[in-house]
Amino acid sequence: MMKKRKSDHIKICLNEDVEAGSTGFDEVRLEHKALPEVDFDKISMDIEFLGKRMEFPVIIEGITGGTKQAGKINRDLAKISQEFGIGFGVGSQRIAIEDEAMGSTYMVRDVAPDILLIANLGAIQLNYGYGLSECRDAVRMIDADALALHLNPLQEAIQPEGERNFSGLIKKVNDISSKLDKPVIAKEIGSGISRDIAAQLRVDAIDVGCSGGTSWSLVEGYRANKEKIGKIFAGWGIPTADCIRELSDINMPLIGSGGIRNGLDAAKAIALGATCVGMALPILKAYSANGTKGVRKFLNEFLTELKTAMFLTGSNAVGDLRGRVRR
């Protein structure tokens, strides 16, 4: 059942219009410097995030796993991540925790020895029998540098097989974070994390995963033939720009994600307070259309756009972008 669900997710994301909501980036303007006092060719785009150095402030977010097709996607995208020096996350590893034979579809460390590699489990599973042992297994399985515990109440509410008991999860997420010997990321997948929830989390980073990108309400609505409710909640959540701005002073690294579609979006996210940005759907679409060549082309264009925005705001380094927003 889970294997078919994962295949359905990829098929729907590629064949249906599953983006909804507003990122809020259209309302954000960066400060333009007519005399930037920066040498374009000497701009540095590397960062350190969760103890790992990355050449660029970009993470290919968890997309898939658990099927033969998923295994190839993960290995191909991980190779590209190694080539570019960016981060990479796998999709939810629950299927591999429950069936060891599926573990190989997530294993990419041999082709990407140096990247920031992020394991992935649903936080909801902590209410359905999972605990520290399974979290350690997920990290160990792929030799990950960090674990993302994804938060997906909207998806679970609409998904036919949804698990909907989200009571007491903040304490359990914090407990895992305090005991796991790797950094823990609290990761939403399309609706954002409000300030009041963020303030209660004791994790190492937050992946905001806001409205404006892939809508899992739409995806699960298509899967369940419940398109009406899927569309009603398609834009549910916090716009990405608003969420990053609200969380910018919580003294925790932020991954800006949710509708990041070009390098200017990335620059705006970082200017508002994100440490780096994450993407999934545009990477999957580029891969589906033109394989690894398409992903390389997309990333090269994306990074050129980000570097151009840095140049025009007088930013020598990624951190210099912080706060360069017109008020």
Image (cartoon, rainbow, N blue to C red):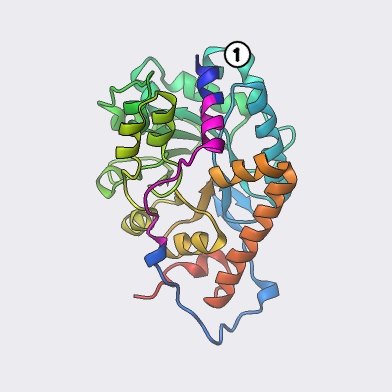
Q: Which residues are magenta?
A: 8-25
Which residue is pictured at 30% across the width and 28% down the height?
169
Q: Quadrant of residue 55?
A: bottom right
Dot 1 crowding, Cα within 10 Å, few <14, some 14–19, many 20+: few
Up-down relation of residue 58 to residue 264 (above or below): above
Residue 146 appears anywhere in the view: no
Whether residue 12 is in magenta: the answer is: yes
Which quarter shows the C terminus?
bottom left
Residue 114: % across, % down: 69, 43
Q: Quadrant of residue 117?
A: top right
Asked if residue 82 lies left or right of residue 177, the reply is: right
Up-down relation of residue 18 to residue 273 (above or below): above
Residue 265: % across, % down: 49, 60
Amino acid residing under circle 1: Glu
The residue lying toward the viewer, choosing from 110 and 79, is: 79
Residue 240: % across, % down: 39, 53
Residue 98: % across, % down: 52, 13
Asked if residue 83 lies left or right of residue 15, the reply is: right
Q: Which residue is mark 1?
A: 100
Which residue is pictured at 40% across the width and 36% down the height?
218
Q: Quadrant of residue 158?
A: top left
Residue 103 appears anywhere in the view: yes
Q: Secondary structure at mark 1?
A: helix
The residue lying toward the viewer, choosing from 18 and 5, is: 18
- Residue at the far bottom: name it: 35
Which residue is pictured at 49% across the width and 80% down the height?
32
